[in-house]
Image (cartoon, rainbow, N blue to C red):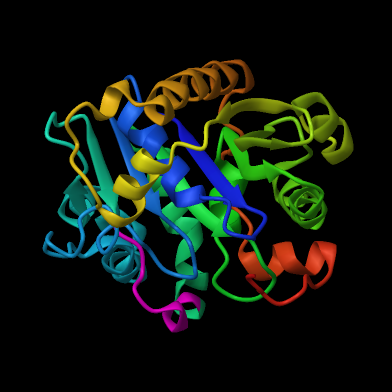
């Protein structure tokens, strides 16, 4: 159906937690794909290590290496259920960031497959940096690319070069939006004006629900009544409506760019650093 991508500017703004909230609140079938080159968190986080690890992204990359014709037939074998209702699944990410460079030649095929999947796909792309293994092909084919960030001066500054990087592969900023996390910081209008892209919505600082989604602490009973999930329902609907108005950007016969190409277009970003 439709491919959506989430990107973090760094500084731990909760991109994966936000992606999980969106997926659990999504109004139609959805796959949450962990495409962060730094590694996936869902198996060790939300499921606290109790769910047997499916082949996931690495298994999909191995299939891509054998030829794109095998991907669609085998995709379901790489997914795990995200909820009990059968509405959501997830593609577990890599477990070792040293595996990321090996993904570089596989991203175009993986991105094409995810963009053509029968369910919506939310790709958690993590923090976009220069170098090998970055999921630029996902960003090129996504109908909407959302930067998940706090409304702080530091986050806005960190987002600037990454907005330039994404716009280089997305053909401009028309499909880019901001999703603000927490209530502190500058106003949405000011953040949108400074960054140059509109604010799609916001998610509250809901520590209890965030602890469940990020580390499996607590119980899922009443989850859909939590402030975070209710806000994610609104943000998700806005993403769907925006995708319907923009359409799928992929061009027939044109392979999506790889991450090395994307990095070369905008120069080299600073190395990853977290506080």
Instruction: Tell whether 71 sits left or right of 159.
Output: left
Percent position of residue 31, x then y: 31, 40
- Residue 33: x %, y % from top left: 37, 50
Residue 98: percent from the left, percent from the top?
45, 84
Q: Residue at x 46, y 72 (%)?
A: 103
Name the residue located 79 percent from the left edge and 35 percent from the top edge. 186
Residue range in magenta is 92-100
Q: Choose between 217 and 161: the one closer to the eye.
A: 217
Quadrant of the drawing holding the C terminus: bottom right
For the point 42% across and 42% down, which residue is it?
207
Q: Residue at x 29, y 46 (%)?
A: 212
Quarter of the image holding residue 10?
bottom right
**Quarter of the figure that contains the N terminus:** top left
Q: Residue 137: x, y in percent? A: 57, 54
220 relative position to 238: left or right: left
Q: Is residue 40 magenta?
A: no
Judge by depth and name the residue closer to the eye, 102 or 94: 94
Q: Is residue 32 above or below residue 29?
A: below
Query: Against 79, is 274 above or below?
Result: below
| Residue 251 seen in the figure | no
* Tally of numbered tags: 0
In the image, 218: left or right of 230? Answer: left
Is residue 209 visible in the rendered structure shown here? yes
On screen, residue 21 above or below 154: above
In depth, the one of 90 and 180 nearer the eye is 180
């Amino acid at each position: 159906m439709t491919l959506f991508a989430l990107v973090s500017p760094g500084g731990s703004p909760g991109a994966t937690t936000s992606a999980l909230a969106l997926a659990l609140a999504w109004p139609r079938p959805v796959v949450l794909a962990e495409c962060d080159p730094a590694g996936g968190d869902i198996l060790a986080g939300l499921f606290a290590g109790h769910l047997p690890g499916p082949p996931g992204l690495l298994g999909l990359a191995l299939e891509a290496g054998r030829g794109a014709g095998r991907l669609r037939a085998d995709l379901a074998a790489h997914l795990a259920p995200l909820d009990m209702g059968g509405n959501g699944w997830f593609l577990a990410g890599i477990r070792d960031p040293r595996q990321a460079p090996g993904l570089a030649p596989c991203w175009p095929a993986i991105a094409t497959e995810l963009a053509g999947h029968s369910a919506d796909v939310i790709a958690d792309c993590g923090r976009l940096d220069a170098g090998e293994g970055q999921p630029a092909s996902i960003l090129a084919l996504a109908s909407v690319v959302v930067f998940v960030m706090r409304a702080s001066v530091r986050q806005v500054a960190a987002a600037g070069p990454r907005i330039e990087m994404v716009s280089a592969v997305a053909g401009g900023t028309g499909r880019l939006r901001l999703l603000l996390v927490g209530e502190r910081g500058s106003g949405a209008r000011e953040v949108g004006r400074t960054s140059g892209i509109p604010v799609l919505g916001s998610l509250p600082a809901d520590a209890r629900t965030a602890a469940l989604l990020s580390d499996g602490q607590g119980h899922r009973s009443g989850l859909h009544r939590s402030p975070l999930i209710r806000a994610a329902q609104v943000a998700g609907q806005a993403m769907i409506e925006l995708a319907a108005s923009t359409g799928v950007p992929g061009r027939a016969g044109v392979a999506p760019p790889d991450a090395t190409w994307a990095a070369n277009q905008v120069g080299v970003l600073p190395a990853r650093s977290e506080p």
